[in-house]
Image (cartoon, rainbow, N blue to C red):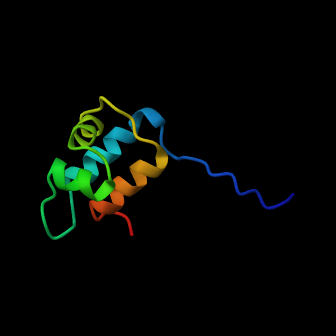
């Protein structure tokens, strides 16, 4: 048995928008980020941020991780 570096996810891909929405609603950044300001930090549009929060778009794992980090819930 070798060292396997394959990443696994504990969350269903369909529920990632819930995690991002929770992070957005419970920000710990010291300031309240808007869709526009969060989008700028992520290098994405405010529309995409809104779509992710409202479940109309599912971000990649990397984008979801960046989303939660920018909201201050992941170090």
For residue 27, what is the image quadrant?
Answer: bottom left
Quadrant occupied by the N terminus: bottom right
Q: Position of residue 45 (x, y in %)?
A: 26, 44
For residue 70, what is the image quadrant?
Answer: bottom left
The residue at the far right in this view is: 1
Residue sitting at x 25%, y 40%: 53
Left or right: residue 4 compared with residue 7: right
Q: Nearer the viewer, residue 34 or 54?
A: 34
Left or right: residue 43 compared with residue 14: left
Q: Is residue 18 above or below residue 6?
A: above
Residue sitting at x 34%, y 32%: 57
Quadrant occupied by the C terminus: bottom left
Residue sitting at x 48%, y 37%: 12
Residue sitting at x 22%, y 37%: 47
The residue at the far top in this view is: 56
Q: How many marks?
A: 0
Q: Is residue 40 above or below residue 45?
A: below
Q: Position of residue 44 (x, y in %)?
A: 31, 47
Left or right: residue 18 compared with residue 13: left
Q: Position of residue 11 (x, y in %)?
A: 48, 43
Q: Position of residue 21 (x, y in %)?
A: 26, 44
Left or right: residue 65 compared with residue 53: right
């Amino acid at each position: 048995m070798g060292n396997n570096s394959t990443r696994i996810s504990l969350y269903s891909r369909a529920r990632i928008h819930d995690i991002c929405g929770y992070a957005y609603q419970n920000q710990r950044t010291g300031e309240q980020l808007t869709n526009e300001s969060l989008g700028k930090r992520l290098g994405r549009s405010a529309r995409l941020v809104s779509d992710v929060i409202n479940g109309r778009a599912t971000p990649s794992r990397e984008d979801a991780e960046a989303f939660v980090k920018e909201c201050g819930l992941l170090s």
